[in-house]
Amino acid sequence: MSTSPAQEAGRAAEEGLARYLVSWHPEPVVDHDDLDAAPTAALSAVLDLPQPAAGPGDTLPLLWHWLHFLEWPPQRELGEDGHPLHGHFLPPLPDRRRMFAGGRLRVQEPLRLGTPAWRRSSLHRVETKHGRSGEMVFVTTRHEFGQGDRSCLVEEQDIVYRCEDRAPSRPVPPDPDAALPREAADWSVPMRPDSRMLFRISALTANSHRIHYDAPYAEQREGYPGLVVHGPLLALLMAESLRRNAQARPTSFDYRLRSPIFTGEELRAVRDGERGDGGRVRLRVETARESRHATAAAGWA
């Protein structure tokens, strides 16, 4: 029995973005990296930090594995926004826009520089949800990292996708004169990112999304009041607060990216209250206009 165009349209609307994902089942893949020390030295310079790991045998700080296993697609395969048009774990959605939402990391032992490492990646979960900006697809990938026959880290990353079917929202511009309170905050790590820092972070992480380095595009095309600070940089800052203040490396680190921060804003990562259940430490990233742009919880087995 045939269906009318109106019925087909109604069925498509009911199925929503899920109809694009029915046959999408990417297989696991394995990648390799020599874990050279140069990216660690480079990020230390960008963040004005003493180099925490200098050579073969030294351990990578928490989350600094993000400097490795990078993908550099050919220039012709980038979309207008700078993201790759195609990729093994990129869902086949039309006019796809993405946002890094957060993740969970479990540490059995740290990765060591100068020792070849492997990463086994797989699709863990796909969900469609409805939010204020419309229908969204949540894709969770699972990455296991190891060296030799040892499994060292397991990380799940949550990426949110939506289709560009509406005008971009326009966040309220931050007050350039606003400043964080001067009172002391536990485990405080301050920062005021500018366009130079964001450009260098983009290069170090192979992140070509234009909202981080192309101000006219970010403002006119995406509707932001300025360049957007990388979400992973906020997570790294919370991990740096732990590295400076905790007495031991955590075995778990869960992080969530909640709302954007823009260049010129003063921000800081701080401890969020006292230790919680099981001795977990909670952290957050704050600015003068919001207290929780990003949050994290670290635990020790």
Image (cartoon, rainbow, N blue to C red):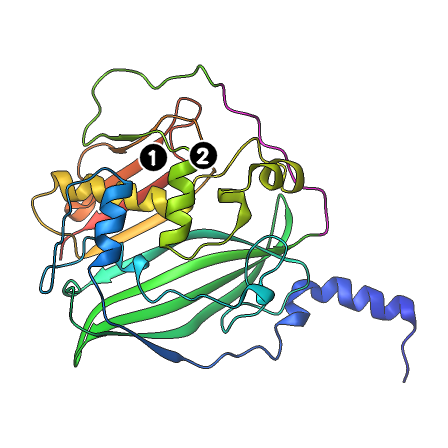
Q: Is residue 15 above or below residue 221?
A: below
Q: Residue 240 appears at what percent x and percent y?
A: 22, 42
**Whether residue 257 can be seen here:** no
Q: Residue 16 appears at what percent x and percent y?
A: 70, 63
The first of marks 2 and 1 along the sequence is 2
Query: How would you rate the neighbour count of disc 1 (Cα within 10 Å): few for under 14, some for 14-19, many for 20 or more?
Result: many
- Tag in front: 2 or 1: 2
Q: Secondary structure at mark 1?
A: strand
From the viewer's side, name the closer residue of 70 and 143. Answer: 70
Q: Residue 41 appears at what percent x and percent y?
A: 21, 51
**Whether residue 81 can be seen here:** yes
Residue tagged by mark 1?
285
Residue extent of the magenta highlight: 165-175
From the viewer's side, name the closer residue of 135 and 155. Answer: 155
Within the image, what quadrant is residue 11 found in?
A: bottom right
Circle 2: residue type: Ile
Residue tagged by mark 2?
261
Within the image, what quadrant is residue 97 found in?
A: bottom right
- Compute the Cα span from label 2 to label 1: 10 Å
Rendered-image quadrant of the N terminus: bottom right
> Which residue is pictured at 36% across the width and 63% down the height?
156
**Horizontal side, residue 132 vs residue 190: left or right:** right
Do the residues under discs 2 and 1 have CB atoms within 8 angstroms? yes
Query: How would you rate the neighbour count of disc 2 (Cα within 10 Å): few for under 14, some for 14-19, many for 20 or more?
Result: many
> How many marks can you see?
2
Q: What kind of secondary structure does the magenta stretch mostly adopt?
A: loop
Circle 1: residue type: Val
Rendered-image quadrant of the C terminus: bottom left
